[in-house]
Amino acid sequence: MAMTIDQLTTFRYILVGIFCFNTLALLLVIFFLDDLYWMFSINIIIYLVLVLGVYILATLLRRRLLEEARGAPAATVVIHVPRGGRRPGAAPRGLVTSPTPTSLELKSAMATEQQHIDGAAAGARRCGQPPVRLLVLFLVTGGFMVQMMLRVTLSVAMVAMVNHTAIPHAEVSAQAACSNWSAADSAAAPPPPEHDDTEVGEYVWDEFTQGLLLAAFYWGYLVTQVPGGFLAERFGSKRVLGVSQGLNGALALLLPVAAAGGPGWVIAVRFIQGVCCGPVYPCLFPLVARWFPLDERQRAFSFVNAMTAFGISLTTTMAGQLSASLGWRSVFYTSGSIALLWAAAWMLLVHDTPHEHPSATEAERRRIGAGNVTSARTVRRPPYGAILRSAPVLAIIIAETANSWSLTYLMTSLPTYMKHVLGFDLRANGVLSGLPLVCRGLMMLTGGSLADLALRRGWLRVVTIRRLAAGLSSGGCALLLFLVTFVGCQPAVATLFVCLAGTFNGLITIGTLLNPLDIAPNYSGSVFGIANLIGNGISTLNPVATGAMIRGEQTAERWNNVFYLGAGIFAVNLVVYQALMSADRQPWDKQEDGERTGNAGGVSVFEEVNNRKAAEATEERQGGGRAE
């Protein structure tokens, strides 16, 4: 028996519920079942993969039914044709199928039939399907979580990969590792145990080599920042994201083989992974510009970044658990497989624009396009000269440098600090290393909602929100990183300060990260690509600089230099960004062709859409009054 569209929609919701329930069960098994939990985990993971496969098949079948409904053949159209001149007494003829209808009759009948089909499809979606842009939002969020997962897995797995006991270190006792260690601290932070099962890794890589391995990803990441933004603007985000993530997942599966060949092969694989991952973030800006109305972009952007932070936290937790129980290789096999599954779902379910998506209603397309100042598809070459000479772009570059530096530290160096200085074991390390990112994500969600509320109510202007959020983010991070240097060997206080720094850093989403959409909606991908290129170029020095500053001595005094450097970078960003930033659309962003609406006078696009909505509401009220 064939399933209807409504039945398929309900079936998909049931599959989503099953998937979420089993994901929760997987986490509970990993955290609370110590013996033989891996057997249950493998079974649940296989079941999750099967559920995801059935969901994709149901979605494809549902899409096919919708396309068949929209493509009803014109030959079946029944036309009312008045049959004048009938003989008296002849039987009246009502509905007939005209063998040779006139052009006007055929067009009218086809238009009426298409309206019925579209209305039925729209009604079915209204009853059981949310807006299509929500599907795009969830899929792009999953893609960014996968991208960050592929970034961070090596930093956690390396704790289990490296044989730390075989590396020459300075003789440092537990008391010397923390400048304020005393007997009173023993209850809060006991000395590291003499035997640690994480110290028996296979590879003898010193701190400097580890820094090179961690930095290799970011070297490749730089190569495709600017090209990635331009490709997304020119060809759309679907192909760029799908291909890059698929290749990235395949390379993750090869990384254990590369590790057996030596650190040079690992550097090569991580470099190519960075090249594949580079276009991912610049693709977000054209995607958000094409799929979300102006008054929803802050929440959409904040949601993607917040869930990405949660994904990093979940990855560090899962990677720590997998490394301790199934070995470090399982981390890369799991992350690579998830990336390949996501790439397949992305290519099947997503389109570049709402006008290309078969399931998007006309009302949703109008909702997205209202007040949108972006081009349907940017075909002009970005004005790189004007972009690089722009003071607001320079402010974004400085801010992205500070953000990339802090994020690189959280993803690469923090697990090492928590293990060697704070004394956490591998399992606790994976959980606690992700806490700052959880705090970061929560602040992103909260900040995005509050920013949209402030704009709708007229409490704050866009430029005020950007300045306030950026100031709190940079100032708070600088202060808290400086305070960490006074903590010494108090794990609870040190973890609290780092988590608070991650919380303040979450405000960057409504501060500097959305700024490219304010000043250049048409070239936001290229602007962010340039900023991310320079920012990540400098942040690639983070693992190397960290390794050089603590080389041979994992002590609190050595790590204080790392925090001093981070605090200084945030302080410089605080001053420069406040002096140079702007929320006005720049003249070099405007295009003569292909632009749906204008934005005169350098007014912020968020303020413009509010003005447009007010004008439309006034027109509707006036029209209603005239009708009455």
Image: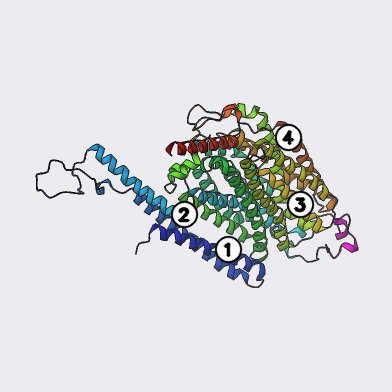
Which amino acid type corresponds to the residue marked 4 in the rendered image? Answer: Gln
Q: Earlier in the sequence, mark 3 or mark 4?
A: 3
Q: Mark 2 — residue?
A: 129
Label 4: which secondary element? helix
What type is the residue that disc 2 sits on? Gln
Observer able to see residue 452: yes
Q: Quadrant of the C terminus?
A: top left
Circle 1 crowding by C-alpha within 10 Å: few under 14, some 14–19, many from 20:
some
Inspect the image, locate mark 1, and give the three-letter code of the amino acid beneath it.
Thr
Cβ atoms under marks 1 and 3 closer than 8 Å: no
Q: Judge left or right: residue 384 versus residue 356.
A: right
Looking at the picture, tell me which residue is in the foreground, 196 or 499.
499
Mark closer to the observer (2, 1):
2
Please tell me which of labels 4 and 2 falls first in the chain.
2
Mark 2 neighbour density, 10 Å: few (under 14) some (14–19) many (20 or more): some
Q: Is residue 485 left or right of residue 592?
A: right
How far apart are labels 4 and 1 at the CA level? 43 Å
Circles 2 and 1: CB atoms closer than 8 Å:
no
- Image quadrant in which you'd find residue 171: bottom right
Which mark is first along the chain, 1 or 4?
A: 1
Range drawn in magenta: 166-190
